Image: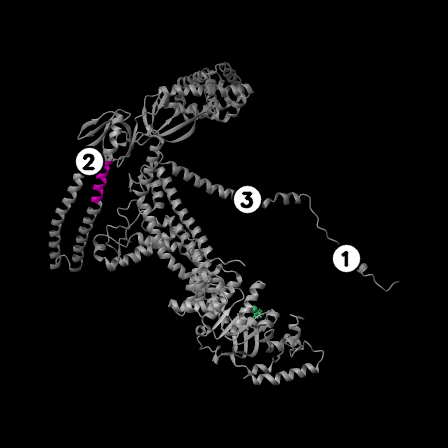
Amino acid sequence: MSQVVDPSATVEAESAKLPRVRRRVRPGASVIAQGEPMLWLTGGGLVICFLMIVTLLLYVLWQGVTTFWPQPIVQVETIDGRVLLGEAFAYDAYELKFSNLAGQSEAAREKLQKMLHPAFHAVVQRELDAGTLSDRVNSNRPMILKAVITQVRLAPTVQQAAPETRAAIVSQIEATLDSKWDAFVTRFAGEVSANAGNESGDALVAAWNAAAAESEATLGELDVDAFRKQFTDGGAAVYSVWASEAWSSLTLPVAVPMRRREFRTENFELTSEHFNWVSDFEIRPDGESFPEWAMLLERVEGGRFYGFPMELRIDGEAVETESAAIWAAFPRLHSECRERWLEGKEIDEIEGGAFNRRREHERLALIETGYHYGKESEEYRTAQAALDESERANAAEYAEIRSRIDELAQLNSRYSLLMRTIGDQQQEIPLAEIVRACPANRLQTGEKCGIYLSRWREFLFDNPREANSEGGVYPAIFGTVVMTLLMSIAVVPFGVLAALYLREYARAGFVVSAVRIAINNLAGVPSIVFGVFGVGFFCYMVGASIDELFYPAKTANVGPTFGTGGLFWASLTLALLTLPVVIVATEEALSAVPRSMREGSLACGATKWQTIRRIVLPRALPGIMTGTILAMARGAGEVAPLMLVGAVKLAPHLVFDLHDWSGSFGPLPTGALHPERSFMHLGFHIFDLGFHSQNSEAAKPMVYTTTLLLIGIIAVMNVAAIWLRAQLRKKFQFSQF
Amino acid sequence: MISNTEQPQSSTTATAVAQSGDAKLNRLEMITRGEHVDAVIHAELAKCASVLDVNDVSLWYGDKQALFDINMIIPDGHVTALIGPSGCGKSTLLRCVNRMNDLIDNVRLGGDMRLNGDSIFSPHIDVIALRKRMGMVFQKPNPFPMSIFENVVYPLRIDGERDRNVLEEVCERALRGAALWNEVKDRLHESGLGLSGGQQQRLCIARAIASDPEVLLLDEPCSALDPIATGKIEDLIDELRGDYSILIVTHNMQQASRVSDFTAFMYLGHLIEYGPTVSLFTNPKLKETEDYVMGRFG
Ligand SMILES: Nc1ncnc2c1ncn2[C@@H]1O[C@H](COP(=O)(O)OP(=O)(O)O)[C@@H](O)[C@H]1O
Ligand SMILES: [Mg+2]
């Protein structure tokens, strides 16, 4: 009736048209929400990544840190009369089985049997207690069957039979075994339980042996007809063969946990072996001891030596014969000898090296004359005469150097140490050849620390010995650092310039995007491809051209200079490899510079370049630095391309040599830096030690320490990057208001 | 130059307003519809000596026109404020003066500006040299990541000035001019980024006046500052009056009325009314201006 429409009514009417939708909570949804499955998934992913990294790092850290700690020297006497002296190097757990008995000495077998028989008894007893012996035999049915048939096939009588007969025999046996199986099992079970009372297990083994003997006799003696008859009627003969196999199958689960240790026994020149594996059961009771005067000698050549000191000799005369007295007198004489040895080595390396270089140079000059004028020319003859002349002078000089070295060696040869090995052999070792000696079992903690540190010092600052498996990695550290620095010098300017162009000058568009994508893709190219490129382009093209231009005579007569792998090409190759890192980091840093700063500078009337140089670059510096250091870390850890462009196992000279300022790059003098030389590199060193070492077992610890070192260097670089970034950020941060 | 745009227009518009009583906002609506509207420019401006002449300036960002035939003069030695709702082209106009719009792609210019008689828009002009003749201060303080001293003398540094005495003198003069000297004189060699927001903005002003600019462009210099810092900057602008010609963009009406001598009201890229601040705020010729300055729209 009323004309007035109640407004609330309209609203209600309208809302009635639309069904009211209420959010319904599905049962279970709340559980999922509480459980947050993505939280667990994402968190789990993080934990797994983290665990993998931490495990790897901890493993390397532990192995690397403990390697140089002096280990005690163990003397081990085995039951078969061997005596070993050395350090426990590694161990390994394995399961001892009946099959291990074969090939052991009598004494060892006796000892093994004492361990295996009770174990056998325990296995059988368990089956008997549980009443599952028959089941066990039945479950081995196919295996036993196969073994019986094999035995029968191999029996001499069967072997001599005609093929049809043989096949007939086999099928007959199969039929017989099928029909008699259950009876056999019952009979066998009775036999086993009859012998199971004996806890030592000997009765069981005796029964097994008896069955085996009987089986052998059966298989060996019969003629074919008797054989067939016996096997078809399922009599004693077939049972004996079957039982022998059933026993064997019963021994399968018998295993005794056992440890074997690898002893580093060395004395290679006497024993021709570095290591010996010894299982614990082989060691005599109380056969392990730590003799007080057992000494470890680390030698310049020939590996380590383990033994007991007998005499300290001067001029072949024993001056000390008492172990303690020898050890008391040893350090002074030893350090004197080592000093002389080092002095001789230095004379050889520095003076002899300079001398050799000069001679080399003169000879090269002659070769060049020959190359330019021909060997028949007047010039060549003059040069030849001059060379002969200077060679005569050289000979005198060389003799002088040689005599000084010889004199030192002569002096050193007077001192030696007579050692007795554990095998009662004697060996005289010149003091000068001993790098480090210690009676390892007498050492106090302080002395151990001293040896530990001295080994680290040698590792970090000395040349490698023994095909790199001992001694130091100094040349490799040096090569890595110099290569990385050169790489940075090459990559940073190019990278920064390229990024500046891309970000500041280039007009954003298709081409710039394409270039950017290409650069990003460059980062994903496998590093070995860069190596191949480096060899092909830098060494064989650029390097060969440089050789052709500047060293034609040398190339033709001696060999390539720049036309082969070397420091310079390796650095450039890695520079190419790390270029994307620098470009991307720099671009990011540039784009992070606020627009307002550029505008501020431009509004002051600065040109674009002034703005870039004075405002943008300083502001972007932290980012650029970070990128650079990341690139350095990447480059320092790279190995694959280096194998192709110049890293070597053992470099005769350092690439930066303060005694040799003749370095050059084509016509450019580079002073003490020799860019053409091949170099050692930590990453390559690891690869070489681990996989190309003659004595890779002994090199293993070095692999860990070198890895630790490389990771350490890279970690230091990364931390430096982070620190630097934080510092510079702080400097350039806006104050908040 | 000004005379031809001034009187006739204002008279015609006055009659237009008088005729259609309901058409209060007609001008603004006309602009919205895309029709052309002439500006009302007060006669007082004709008497002023100008530092900057703006002649028929139009500007396009790509296809979109942001400024429509702007004609005005910026009087010498005075403070001129640009007001208008946000997006009306104040900053754009300001950035035309030192050709900062060159940095943006696809910008097209029409008309010309003359700084003390020298063309600004001419393609042959040396933009760098032109920018050296003016100073600009931005909405957000943008000191450089260097010391306070280096911040102030930056314009001289890029001119290759090396003489320490000259630099120190200029630094002190500029910092005193920006009323910052007493606060920072003991830490001239600390980073400019360590100052407070208001101090940073005054540092930017010091940088802008260090090279003795012919005109000082301020683009909402106080919008990122608290009221106290704003007060200091306003006092500073007051002190700079007379020594410098200042063109200031602000969307704060009180600020415009406090600091400026002349005020221009813009709307959607058009200049609507331009005259002495006092008359524009108390007795505007247009109803639209009155509405805007009274805060009735915008
Ligand atoms: N770089 C640019 N590109 C395109 N359009 C722009 C650009 N800068 C400003 N504009 C447009 O020009 C008009 C005026 O902008 P602006 O001058 O910044 O206004 P105000 O400073 O008055 O708030 C606005 O509509 C804005 O969207
Ligand atoms: Mg603006």
> Does residue B70 appear in the picture of this structure?
yes
Q: How is the image coloured?
A: one colour
Disc 2 and disc 1: Cα gap in Å? 110 Å
Q: Is residue B170 left or right of residue A471?
A: right
- On the image, numbered disc 2 is attached to which residue? A412
Q: Are marks 2 and 3 on the same chain?
A: yes
Q: Nearer the viewer, mark 2 or mark 1?
A: 2
Based on the displayed image, in which of its 4 quarters is residue A499 positioned?
A: bottom left
Mark 1 — on which chain does it sit?
A: A
Rendered location of residue A71, percent (x, y): 35, 31
Residue range (magenta) = A335-348
Q: In the image, what residue type sits under mark 3?
A: Gly
Rendered location of residue A655, percent (x, y): 28, 50
Quadrant holding the C terminus of chain A = bottom right
Q: In the image, what residue type sits under mark 1?
A: Ser
- On the image, numbered disc 3 is attached to which residue? A43
